[in-house]
Image (cartoon, helix red, strand yellow):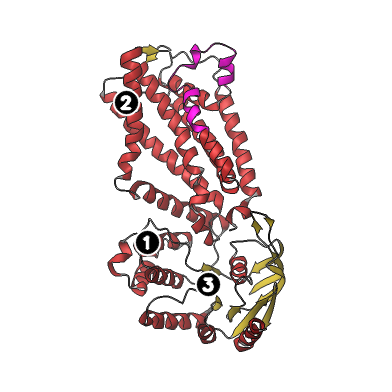
Amino acid sequence: MSQTRSSATVTFSVWRALFLREAVSRMMGKRMAWVWLLVEPLFHISYLAIYHGVLRSRSIGGINTVLWIVVGVLAYYMFVYPARRSMHAISANQALFVYRQIKPVDTVLVRVALEAFLMVIITIVVLCLVGLAGIDAVPDDPLLVLAAAGGLALTALGFGLLASVLHELTPELGKILELFFLPLYVVSGTIFAISGVPEPYRGWMMLNPLAHGIEIARQGFASYYHVVPETDIVYLYSVAIVVLALGLALQVRFKEKLVAK
Amino acid sequence: MIIVDNVHKRYVTDHGPGRWILKGVSLTIPKNVTVGLVGRNGAGKSTLLRLIGGIDTPNQGRVTRQCRVSWPMSAGGLQGSLTGRQNVKFACRIHGHERDMAERLAAVQEFAELGSYFDEPVKTYSQGMRARLQFGLSLAFDFDTYISDEVTAAGDSVFRKKAAQAFKNLTDRAGLIMVSHSESTLRQFCTAGIWLHDGQAYWFDDIGDALKNYKESIAA
C-alpha cells in the first residue's frame, strides 16, 4: 500500500483530471464542437464590425470602429464565457461527487480556468484575422490589456462561484441570473459608446464593472483612445475581489449541501 | 479501522427537514473484515455507505476513517459523453496514478471485456456493459476497504462468475462493506453483518444472524 497523499497533491491531481475531462467534452463532445467555439464570436464580431464600421462611422473615441468593436466583444466574452459556463458547473458534475476527492468548488474553478484559456486562444485567432484584414491590431500597451482581461476573468470567477451555488440551491434564482446576461451585453458598452451617454445615466452605467474592463482593454490597444472619464481599473479589481470573497464564502458555507442528494 | 460515532442523518426535502434515517448509529468496523449491510428499503443502507465513503456528512456525530476507503461503488461516476477509456483515465488521475496509468488501463480493459466499445462513449453502453466497466474500475485501485453498493449484481453468468472470483481475491487482502439484496451474495462474500432497523445499527459477527434478524423484522 502506498502512502496517503497530501491534500495539495490530491487537489492538484483533481484539477488536472477535471481540466482534461472538461476540455475533451467541450471540444470533442459534439461533432466539430471546436469549430463552433470559434464560429460564434467570429460571426458576432463580423456583423457588428460591418454594421458599425461600414454603415455608420469610421472611428469611435478616436480609434478604428472595427478594432473598437472587436476588442469590446472579445473583452465582453472574457467575462461572459467563463461566467455563463461555470454557473452550471456544479449541477453538470453531480455524478462526480461520488469521488470524495472532488469538491463542488473544484468543478467551478476548473471550468473558469478552461473557458478563460479558450478565450485567450480565440482572442489571438480573431486578432490575427483582423490584422490580416489590414487593421492595426497590435496592442500599444499589452500589459494593460492583460490587466483588463485578468480583471474580467477574475470577476467571472467570483460570479461563477456565487452563481453556481445559487443555481444549485435555488434554480429559480439561477434563471433570474441568466436573464441578466442579455441586457448586460448592451449596457457594458460593447456596441455603443458609453462616453456619449449624458450624466447622471453614465455614472450609473459605470457601476457595472464589465464596462470598466472593456474600456481599459480598448485603451490598452490604442493609447490615444478617449476612455469614459469614470474608467478605473481599481474599481474593476475591487468588485472582482468582493465577489470572489463572497463566492468562496458561499462555497464553504454550503459545501455539504451541494453534494447531498 | 472505520469508526462511526453516534451518527444522525436526515435529508432536507422540498417540504422541510425529512424524518431521521439514522438515529445515533455507532459502529467500529475493523480492518480486513467483510461486512454485509442488511435492512429493508429506505432503512439507510446507502446513506450509511455514503457517510462511510465520505461523500456526505452526518447532521450529528462523526465518521473517522483510519485507512484508505474506496468510493461507494455503484452505477454512478461515469460520464456518458466520454468513452470508457477516458472515464478510466479520469479515475486514475484523481487517485494519483498518472504514472502507471497504462497498466491500469490495460487491466480494466482486459477485465471488462468490452472490446471496441471501450473507445465508444459510455452512453452507448448497455446496462450490463456499464456494470462491467464499473466493476473493472473498482478493482483497478488498491484500497484497504472497499465499499460496494450492489455492484456485483450485473452481467451474464460467465462474467458474474469471474467477478465473484475477483471479489473473493480482493477480500483476501482488503476489507469490504457491501449492500446487496441477494442473500446468497452476502453469504458468499461477507463474514460479519450489520442490520439497520429503525435508525439503529446492530452488529453481528456472523452474517447469518444479521440476515435472520432482518427476515424476522420483515415477517413481523
Residue marked by disc 3:
B149
Q: Mark 1: few, some, or many residues within 10 Å (few <14, many ≥20)?
A: many
Residue A194 is one of the magenta-drawn residues: yes
Residue marked by disc 1:
B122
Is A117 or A189 nearer to us in this picture? A189
Indicate the position of residue A235 as horizontal and vertical percent values: 59, 25
Question: For numbered disc 3, what is the local secondary structure?
Answer: strand
The residue positioned 44% from the left and 38% from the top of the image is: A116
Q: Mark 3: which amino acid?
A: Asp
Is A94 or A69 nearer to us in this picture? A94
Residue marked by disc 2:
A46
Q: Is residue B161 left or right of residue A125?
A: right
Residues shaded magenta: A180-206
Q: Mark 2: which amino acid?
A: Ser
Q: In this view, does B74 lie above or below A10?
A: below
Chain bearing mark 2: A
